[in-house]
Image (cartoon, rainbow, N blue to C red):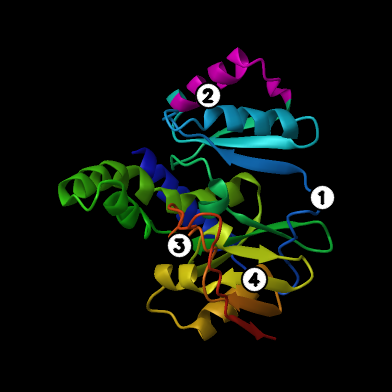
Amino acid sequence: MKQLFYIACLSSLLACKQTSNDKFHMPAEWESHEAVWLGWKADSTAGFYPTVIEMIETLTPHVTVKIAFNSMELMQTGKNYLVQQKIDTSNIKFYEMPGDRYWIRDHGSAFLVNEKGELAVADFGWDYYGYPQFLKEKYDDNQDSVAKYLNKRLPSMSKTSLVDSLMAITENAKIFKTKVVHEGGNIEVNGKGTLIVCESAIKNRNPDLDNQFIESEFKRVLGVSKVIWLKQGLADDPNGFYRRIVDNYAEVVYSIRMSS
């Protein structure tokens, strides 16, 4: 029932909020901002909690921190944990949204602004293209384990694509939607019209779309005018999770294509 509610909200609100993007742009990360969004994951066995707490402690004196939780139960657990860590929650806002990932930068909204100070969001598609390969490497190509853990995560992961739209609705922001599937950590912008994108990652997520179309969509929804394509990502990050630095060295080979 809850998922049907999410879909109903999105269907009605997206229809009236989508518009053309001729004035909005994505600011650079180092520009002034009012809030930082975080996700909250239920499983703390990976040791994320201390780092997240340190981030929150550092941020809250300066900006509002907004945290997305997959359920009301998880939200209450998170609030209790923050209190136990003696975190001042007066500058923290809590939201129930689907998805169970910390790194909301990847699947959450790409926020845009215009000269009037109005807020908008670039709403990209989302998938879990790297997760099967991650499981394959983690469990030494044991297909039974891959299938087991993939099926276990799929219900929650499939809802992750709703998060950026729900964030836009929460912020009362205009929505610029595109069918390009994208992760936020795959790009950098300078806030002056230039975008850097890793080609291998964007092509893995969009095997049926050509670069020309993808580039035109980035320009349309992010308000950029120039795109710099990096053929590959970091040498120690071939698919997002396992390093391949040998001893103290890494072979770095980049091919850059720029358009204007």
57 and 208: which is toward the camera: 57
Question: What secondary structure is found at the residue carrying circle 4?
Answer: strand
- Give the residue drawn at x 37%, y 60%: 129
Q: Amino acid at mark 1?
A: Ser
Q: Is residue 224 magenta?
A: no
Q: Which residue is mark 3?
A: 238
Q: Would you say the magenta stretch is mainly helix, strand or loop?
A: helix
24 to 162, vertically: above or below: below
Q: Which residue is mark 4?
A: 196
Q: Quick check: 208 left or right of 234?
A: left
- Give the residue drawn at x 20%, y 49%: 147
Mark 2 or 4, which is nearer the eye? Answer: 4
Q: Can I make out residue 184 in this image?
A: yes
> What is the span of residues highlighted in magenta in the rendered image?
74-90
Tell me which label, 1 or 3, sits earlier in the chain: 1
Number of other residues with Cα within 10 Å of mark 2, as a class: few under 14, some 14 to 19, many 20 or more: some
Q: Amino acid at mark 4?
A: Ile
Q: Position of residue 79 (x, y in %)?
A: 56, 21
Do callouts 2 and 3 mark residues in contact (Cβ within 8 Å)?
Answer: no
191 to 39, vertically: above or below: below
Q: Which residue is mark 2?
A: 78
Mark 2 or 3, which is nearer the eye? Answer: 3
Question: What secondary structure is found at the residue carrying circle 3?
Answer: loop
69 to 21, vertically: above or below: above
Q: Quadrant of residue 22?
A: bottom right
Number of other residues with Cα within 10 Å of mark 3, as a class: few under 14, some 14 to 19, many 20 or more: some
Number of other residues with Cα within 10 Å of mark 1, as a class: few under 14, some 14 to 19, many 20 or more: few
Q: Which residue is mark 1?
A: 32
Q: Quadrant of the N terminus?
A: top left
Q: Is residue 76 magenta?
A: yes
Q: Can I make out residue 21 in this image?
A: no
Alpha carbon distance from label 4 to label 1: 21 Å
